[in-house]
Image: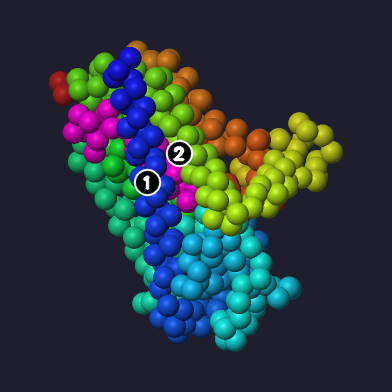
Amino acid sequence: MAKKIKAVSLYILIFAVSAMLLAGLLLASACIPQSRIQKHMEESADILCEHDRIWYVIPGVESSQNHLYADAITANIAYHLSDGNPLESVMWAGYYYQGGDVNTSLRTAVQNHLEAETQYLRYWHGSAAVVRLLHIFLNIKQIYWMHAAVILGLLAFLLVMLMRNRMYAEAAAFIFSMIMVSIWFVPFCLEYTWTFLCMLIASIIGIRLVMKGQSDRLGLLFLITGGVTVYLDFLSTETLTLVVPLLLILRVMEKQKGNTADINPWFLTLKSSVLWIIGYVGMWVSKWLLASMVLHENVMPYVESHIGDRIGGVNPAGSLAGYIAGSILRNVKCLLPFDYGMIGAIILLVMIVAFIVLPIVLDKVTLKNEINKGIIVLYFFIGGIPLLRFALLRNHSWYHRSFTFRALAGTLLAVSFIITEIMEWKKIDEHS
C-alpha cells in the first residue's frame, strides 16, 4: 500500500510541476516586449494575408487544405500576450478581431498596435508562447520551414532507431502511416504541427526507455505527453500522441521479450491510456481553474457551450448513427489514395500490387505458424481509439475532417502491425 501511495504521489507531483512549468513558459513569453516581435509579426501578417484563411495547396485535395484560420488566431494571441499584465493576458488568450476575416484582423492589429478585444480562454494556447518567442528571430514562413526541418530530423532519428534494432517491418509500417496522411503538408500549418512533434518525441523517448530497461517510467511519459498535447494543440489530432507511441512501444517490447517478459501488454496499455487521459484532461481543467482564480470569476460559461457544439452541434446526417458513420467516413476519404483522384487510384493500385499481390504470387509470404491472437485484439482496440474520438466529437470530426483525419495514422499503424502478426516472409532455404 505504501508503495502505491508513493507512486500516486509521484504522479501528482510530476503533473503539478509540469503544469507549472508549462504555465511559466506562457508567462515568460508574455514578458517579451511587443517591440521585440513587431518586425517579424508585421511580416507574418502580410504572409498570412497572401491566401484566404482556408485554402488548398492542391485544388480539390482535402488533405492539402491549409487552415490559416487557426494560424492567424495563434499569431494574434501571441502578439497580444501583454508584458504589462502577463498573467491575465495568458488566461484570457485575447486577440483582435474586427469581423470578416482573421487574417486581415491580425494585420490591422499589428500595423495599428490595437488591443485585444476577443477572448479564446477555453484553450491553453501554449503554442502561442512558442510562436511569440520564435517571432523575435523568424516570421511565420520561416517558422514553417523550421518545423519541416525538425519533423524531418525526428522522423529520420526514429526510423534509424528502429532499423538499428532490426525492426524493419515497424519502420516500413510507420512510413506507410505517415504517407497515407500526407505528412508533407503538416509543417506548413502551425495547427497541424504540434501533435506530430509530440508524437515523434514521445515515441523516441518511449522506445529508448524500453530498450534501456526503464519501462517503469512509461507511465510518467504518457502523463506528461497528455498534458503537453492539450497545452499545445488546437484540438486537431490529439490521439496521435497516445496511439502511435504506445503501438511502437508494444512492438519494441515484443522484440525485447527477454527484458520485458514480466510486463503485461494489456495492463501497460490500460495504465498508459489512463495516465495520458489524466494528463490531457487534467491539464485542460487546470487552465479553467487557474483562470477562475486569476480573473476572479467563474470561466465555465466561456467553455460549456463549445463543449456541447463539438460533441453534437447541428446534425447534418439526420440520425445519430448516420452522424457518427459520416464523421468517420469523411475522415477516411481524406487518406492519400482516396483523396488524390486518378493519381491516388494509381498509387493505391501500385501499393496493392507491390505489397500484397506480388509477394503472394511469388510465394514470398506465408501465414505464421503461431499467431498471437491476444496482441492482435489489443492492436485492434488501440487502433480504434481515433475512430472512437471521431464518434464522440462527431461535430468537430465532421466539419474539420481536412486535418482530424491525420489521427488515422495511428489506426493504419495498428492495422499494419496486425498484418505483421498474421503474415511473415518465408525464410530462404539455404540448402535448396
Seen in the picture, residue 160 relative to 130 is either above or below; the reply is above
SS at mark 1 in the image: helix
Instruction: Give the overall secondary structure of the magenta segment.
Output: helix
Question: Is any atom of residue 325 visible in this view?
Answer: yes
In front: 165, or 431?
165
Residue 347 percent location from the top left of the image: 51, 50
For label 1, the residue is: 18
User: Residue 224 colored magenta?
Assistant: yes
SS at mark 2 in the image: helix
Q: Residue at x 32, y 32 (%)?
A: 10
Mark closer to the observer (2, 1):
1
Kind of residue at disc 1: Ser
Are circles 2 and 1 on residues that touch, CB within 8 Å?
A: yes
What label sits on residue 279 in the rendered view? 2
The C terminus is located in which quarter?
top left
As drawn, is 127 to the left or to the right of 319? Answer: left
**Label 1, residues with CA under 10 Å away: few <14, some 14-19, many ≥20:** some
